[in-house]
């Protein structure tokens, strides 16, 4: 009798957290979602950087008259501009690098599985590969962000000083 009651009970329904997680995974697996997020991140970055650029230039023009040499305010402003644009370029590169990194990681793990690696070895190799890929991506992002920051700082300084000398 107990066995019959146990068999007649309906299976438990999935919890709301697991169903919301599967919904999240389904949404995030769509290419349109990634394109939308990419465009949204770029729009937010451009809007905030434009406002920040205007505030830095406003600060520069207000403090320009206080100093005898035009170099110091221009140096401060150009370093700030370079740092901001370096951070923005790194944030934009992350939006591109995450999907590319995931594809690379999946490809390597699948190739290891095709070569007949045991599951335990596959898990260990997967963790090792994850560390290597993440380290490589982080190193590349920092290098590119620093290059953009230096280029923007030098160009910003040149533009601010040349504008000041022209007035």
Image: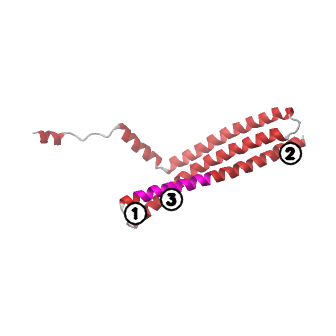
Q: Is residue 63 magenta?
A: no
Decide which of tag 1 and tag 2 comes sooner along the chain.
1
Residue indicated by mark 3: 104
- Alpha-carbon distance for marks 3 and 1? 14 Å
Specify the farthest residue to the left.
Answer: 1
Residue indicated by mark 2: 162
Position of 86 with respect to 75 (left or right) is left
- Alpha-carbon distance for marks 1 and 2? 60 Å
Decide which of tag 3 and tag 1 comes sooner along the chain.
3
- Alpha-carbon distance for marks 3 and 2? 46 Å
Q: Is residue 131 magenta?
A: yes
> For numbered disc 1, what is the local secondary structure?
helix
Q: Residue at x 22, y 40 (%)?
A: 10
Colour scheme of the rendered structure: secondary structure
The residue segment tinted magenta is 123-141
In the image, is residue 126 above or below residue 162? below
Q: Residues within 10 Å of mark 2 (few under 14, many from 20)?
A: few
Q: Residue at x 55, y 48 (%)?
A: 35
Residue indicated by mark 1: 113
Q: Residues within 10 Å of mark 3 (few under 14, many from 20)?
A: some
The spot of residue 156 in percent (x, y) is 78, 45
> For numbered disc 2, what is the local secondary structure?
helix
> For numbered disc 3, what is the local secondary structure?
helix
């Amino acid at each position: 009798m107990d066995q019959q009651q146990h068999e007649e009970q309906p299976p438990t329904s999935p919890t709301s957290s697991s169903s919301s997680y599967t919904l999240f995974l389904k949404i995030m697996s769509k290419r349109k979602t990634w394109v939308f997020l990419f465009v949204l991140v770029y729009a937010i970055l451009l809007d905030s950087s434009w406002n920040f650029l205007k505030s830095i230039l406003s600060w520069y023009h207000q403090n320009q008259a206080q100093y005898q040499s035009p170099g110091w305010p221009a140096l401060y402003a150009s370093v700030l501009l370079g740092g901001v644009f370096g951070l923005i370029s790194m944030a934009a590169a992350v939006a591109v690098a995450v999907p590319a990194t995931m594809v690379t990681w999946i490809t390597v793990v699948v190739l290891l599985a095709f070569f007949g690696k045991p599951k335990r070895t596959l898990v260990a190799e997967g963790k090792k590969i994850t560390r290597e890929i993440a380290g490589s991506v982080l190193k590349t992002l920092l290098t590119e962000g620093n290059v953009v920051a230096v280029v923007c700082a030098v160009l910003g300084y040149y533009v601010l000083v040349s504008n000041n000398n022209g007035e």
